[in-house]
Amino acid sequence: MDYQELCNQVFSADKRIRYATVTDSQCNILAGGMRHGVASLESSEDARRIDLQVTILDGVMRTWSESLGRARFALIQHEKAYMVIVPFNNRHVELSIETSMSLEEIGRLVALVEIAARQVVSEREATGERG
């Protein structure tokens, strides 16, 4: 499994997932994007700024993890969408989800992302690639 397959698996999990990416600590999007056929809620300029801010939040979560323990995910509830950030190996999965998804369903989705991310990391390490 690679990063794009991870994003594809996330999109396959639920039609309410609007956006799924794997992003590194330098704010480079490694895979994913908007679900085909779904319009973005923000302009392309705003989208890039949001990706940068999410990367900064990922760094904050990692700093807090040094004293509080590993962060599994961050959830931000907006009127129009949920934003979910799932950190792993100096990268993170960023999701935008329709607000009709319940918190219980989001918890199951985060578990799916964590399993898929571990699989990607394991397969990359087995071939000598990093993270």
Image: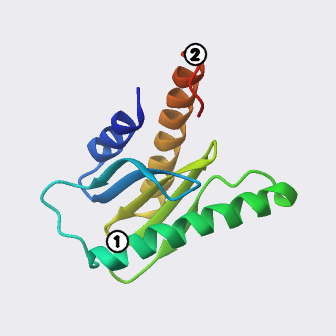
Per the model, the C-alpha gap separating discs 1 and 2 is 38 Å
Disc 1: CA contacts within 10 A as few (<14), some (14-19) or many (>=20): some
Instruction: Tell me which residue sits at (12%, 59%) in the image.
Output: 37
Q: Which residue is mark 2?
A: 126
Q: Is residue 84 left or right of residue 12?
A: right
Mark closest to the chain's N terminus, 1 or 2: 1
Q: Which residue is mark 1?
A: 99
Question: Measured from the top left, where is residue 56 in percent x and y?
Answer: 61, 68
Q: Is residue 40 above or below residue 67?
A: below
Question: Measured from the top left, where is residue 9 in percent x and y?
Answer: 33, 38
Q: Quadrant of residue 131?
A: top right
Indicate the quadrant containing the N terminus: top left, top right, bottom left or bottom right.
top left
Instruction: Tell me which residue sits at (35%, 64%) in the image.
Output: 97
Q: Which amino acid type corresponds to the residue marked 1 in the rendered image?
A: Thr
Q: Is residue 50 left or right of residue 91?
A: left
Q: Nearer the viewer, residue 86 or 106?
A: 86
Mark drawn on residue 28: none
Q: Is residue 67 left or right of residue 19?
A: right
